[in-house]
Amino acid sequence: MNEKAIEKLLNPPPNGKIAAAKEFGIDLTLLARKLRLTPEERLEELQQAMESFEELRREAEKSRQNDKTKVGNRSARPAQS
Amino acid sequence: MIKLRSAIEALARHKVKFVIVGGVAINLHSSAYVTYDLDFCYSRERENLKRIVEALAHFKPRLRDFSENLPFIWDEQTLKSGTNFTFQTNIGDIDMLGEVTGVGAFEDVLAQSKVMNLFGFEINVLSIEGLIKAKKAAGRTKDLLVLPELEALQEALKREE
């Protein structure tokens, strides 16, 4: 259905907004892939992305807490003579 | 993090007049943009406020920028007393906009929306053109950063829609 649009994204016509987006650093292959999905599939992917980021955020927080504990344990260790 | 399906289905089941705007709308148009809340523009007709109250009551909405200790009543009167609201609910953050900067009030937003089929419901989603207007009008760095992607999609889809 979006084949022409996908083709334009993968081979941007010169001097247009697509070429400008590529120049700006947008990964146009991601947009092309999303165009192949239905709106509902796009929403499901968005939900999965949110959940993955949330899980990463929680892991990073856990790791920071562990680091703090380690530092705390080190500072609490009695000095050796 | 918002549970999108729960929120959209609840609004649609209660026949709320709403248009999805913001990051979720951007994503629905094939952008890779990731957002964590659901923004929608809503009709401020009395009957619609009643439907919103019924649709979202189960999710226990409360104002995000208010202390949890302050009393908050989720009813039509509360919705009547403001235009734009930022809520946290037990399914995530939901922002309700009576108007969208650069686009207008609900009727203007609806006129610039596109119908998409989501979870068996026909849902109005602000068009790419409308999103570009809104982002330009908002003018914050985070809004402007998404413009190249939206404009690329607009150009790619120009003759296909």
Image (cartoon, coloured by chain):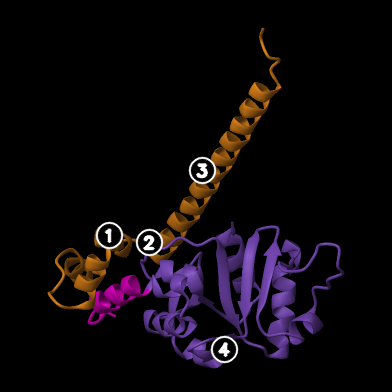
Amino acid type, label 1: Asp
Q: Nearer the viewer, residue A74 or B152?
A: A74
Amino acid type, label 4: Phe
- Subunit that carries the residue with mark 2: B
* Above-or-below relation of A60 to B148: above
Q: Are marks 2 and 1 in contact (CB under 8 Å)?
A: yes
Q: Are marks 4 and 2 in contact (CB under 8 Å)?
A: no
Q: Which residues are magenta?
A: B147-161
Which secondary structure is most common in the magenta stretch?
helix
Label annotation for residue A56: 3
Label annotation for residue A53: none
**Letter of the chain shown purple in the rendering:** B
> Mark 3 or mark 2: which is in front?
3
Q: Residues within 10 Å of mark 2 (few under 14, many from 20)?
A: many
Q: Which residue is mark 1?
A: A27
Q: Which residue is mark 4?
A: B106
Would you identify the image quadrant in which residue A71 lies?
top right
Q: Report whether mark 2 lies on the same chain as mark 1.
A: no
- Subunit that carries the residue with mark 4: B
**Letter of the chain shown orange in the rendering:** A
Measured as percent of width and height from the top left, residue B61 is found at 74, 66
Q: Residues within 10 Å of mark 3 (few under 14, many from 20)?
A: few
Would you identify the image quadrant in which residue B14 lies?
bottom right
Q: Which residue is mark 2?
A: B32
Whole-angstrom CA distance, mark 3 to mark 2, is 18 Å
Q: Residue furthest top?
A: A81
Measured as percent of width and height from the top left, residue A72 is found at 67, 28
* Above-or-below relation of B127 to B5: below
Whole-angstrom CA distance, mark 2 to mark 1, is 9 Å
Q: Residues within 10 Å of mark 4 (few under 14, many from 20)?
A: many
- Tag 4 secondary structure: helix
